[in-house]
Amino acid sequence: MASSSPVKPLTLLLVALVFLAGCLGGGTDVVIDVGDSDTPDGEGGNGTGGDGGEGDPPAPIAVSQTAGCDNLNPIHCMLPFPSDAFLIEDSTTVTGLRVNYQNDTLPVSGSVESVNIPGLNRFDGMSPSTQIMTAFTTIANLTGVADQHTIAISLEDGHATILLNLDTGARVAHWVENDARQSDDNQTLIFIRTIQGLEPNTNYGVGISGLGVSPSPAFQAILAGVETDASDVEARRASLDSLITTLESEGHDRASLVAAWSFHTASMGSILGGTLQMRSDALERLGDDGIGCTVNSVDNPWDDDDRAFRRIRGTFTAPQYLESLEPPTLMSRDANGTPSFVQNGEVPFTLVIPQVLVDNNRSGPLIVFGHGFLGNGEGAVSGSGIGWNDEFEASFIATDIIGWSMHDIDTIAFGLFDPSYFENQANRLQQMLVNQMAMVRTFKGVCSDLEVMHHNGTNLVNTSDVHYMGYSLGGIYGASITAFSPDIDRAALWVGGSGFSYMIERSTNYYRFEEGFMHPQAYPERNDRALLVAVCQQMWDASDPDIWLRFAAEGYGNEIGPFEILSIISVNDAQVPGLVSDRAARNAGIPVLDSSARLPYGINTAVGPITGSAVVYWDGGYPTMPEDNSPPPVEQASKAHNEIAPIVAVNEMVEIFLNTGVIVDTCDTTCTFDYEAESAAE
């Protein structure tokens, strides 16, 4: 290239990079002129310490850098997320990789100078249930991009975003949204929402084209083949170039790309290995019949409606792997990071026997009941559970879903200011699975014939075939509890879902914590909060139904057996969003009853009666929830979520399923209900 006047090579290079996104024609090669061969020696030096003569390489492009960060995107240390930038090689793991968050990677709060969560770096990849996100200096234009109602177009040629399984070459269905909670267009996150869990131990690539945004300077340099001064970016140059070549073969021209990155998901052994070893150890200690139980109190009779005959409160013995029975506490681990036995602990239970069994002098089945968010087992079976055990003619037993129980509120609150506390909370969720399993085994075994279960010579509690029913949080974690326990094979899950980090911001339950999370001494920056929620998913994976639902049809190896679920969903639920209910059904691979009020994308329909599992959507005519991730209306919190509970047709469906394993279509053509009308008729 000839020039009428000398032009400094670095100046020309920077100008070329600034205009790269707008000046490249589709399908053309990237060519950047880095200097003028006629430039006199000594003029226009390249900043590398050379003499500036002909043939000297251009100076590397300066990129904003922070230690411990992914310097591909200057908007946030952890963007794009999740990223191979935070994985290092490790020959001792299944994937050959290991997570490597450094001491200055996770955002600090106004209360702590450094956030260190050791458990994260034990994983050999990123969470298969991960949220996927990045940000640009202007808000993305999502016109024509797949949303939650047009998911199928995400798989089409020419779609602006692509999520690619790099091991198989398959495109992965998804939808896209801008962050409605961010007020700054110059930092607004763009989310690529997966519709179910990703495959474990798999390479994934993300590509974004167009959208009216510009690539970061570091990514511009990658596109242009120009060196940067960021060592972490340069270390990934070859892999990024390979990814870009792959994306070009999928129709994403280099000229139009504005972001691309890859990540590797953790192996199932890394996610569940410790939990399953804990399970195996606990089962050996429990034996075939459990260890024992103690009755502390008996209330007989005790409820005002005379529907409950007897409430039995006490404790059962369960192997404990936490350092303490009281939160906050971490898991006790050996040198390899495997959970290790600490002691046998006494865990509270509450058992309620309905009056109807006494009236008929007969035994009824035993149902494990899962309570709601930040509740407890006793409150659940002593409250709403009374109506169900009377109607189903069954005894209900419950213990706390520790990790998300009323006893964990302080730990969760501490976590808003210091996220390391969420490792304590996540560890309690894993112990919760052991506790639930121990309770069932104990009451099927050594505590199956307690004197307090008898009346007029009849044992009112038949523990030979135990099933599960959970509501809200209990409907969420019920799938994990059922999969984990070898003594439960059937579960009715009311208003549940999977992928806890996906539902948080779309739930009215979040508002009670959000103000604290936003506090200046916590995390006033929106993107910090979003990324920390996403990071927590990795810790929650070991107990999240996003993982355990995968085993519903066929089990998992020789350890986890198959199980059946009936998922009851109320349309426009403000507490558990329908998006995560859809997600749970896809993870389990179950059909949707064809008369359902909703027939979500990617879920096969089936005609009732159905033997096995299914999801059923019931519509009570409630207001539509926000399309984006803005806060749902708090005044709707108890509407769709709670008012489906007493509907007769829904309860008939649940009762038949629990008793027989068959899902009978009790809908009148379409699964709808009218809470006000049905309540007035009672």
Image (cartoon, grey):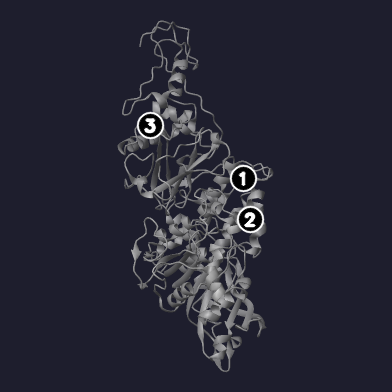
Q: What is the CA distance from the residue labelled 2 to the residue labelled 3?
A: 43 Å
Residue pointed to by mark 1: 115
Amino acid, disc 1 = Val
Task: Name the quarter where the C terminus is drawn.
Answer: bottom right
| Label 1 with label 2: CB-CB less than 8 Å | no
Q: Quadrant of residue 164?
A: top left
Q: What is the CA distance from the residue labelled 1 to the residue labelled 2?
A: 15 Å
Q: Nearer the viewer, mark 1 or mark 3?
A: 3
| Label 1 with label 3: CB-CB less than 8 Å | no
Amino acid, disc 2 = Ile
Q: Which circle's residue, 1 or 2, is located before the other in the chain?
A: 1
Q: Which circle's residue, 2 or 3, is located before the other in the chain?
A: 3
Q: Which circle's residue, 1 or 3, is located before the other in the chain?
A: 1
Question: SS at mark 1?
Answer: loop
Q: Is residue 578 left or right of residue 347?
A: left
Residue 151 x, y percent position in the rendering:
39, 49
Residue 381 x, y percent position in the rendering:
59, 74
Residue pointed to by mark 2: 412
Q: Nearer the viewer, mark 1 or mark 2?
A: 2
682 and 564: which is toward the camera: 682
Residue pointed to by mark 3: 256
Residue 410 x, y percent position in the rendering:
67, 57
154 and 194: which is toward the camera: 154
Q: Nearer the viewer, mark 2 or mark 3?
A: 3
Residue ID at (60%, 46%): 116
Q: What is the CA distance from the residue labelled 1 to the residue labelled 3?
A: 37 Å
Q: Is residue 623 left or right of residue 246?
A: right
Amino acid, disc 3 = Ser
Residue 254 x, y percent position in the rendering:
36, 31
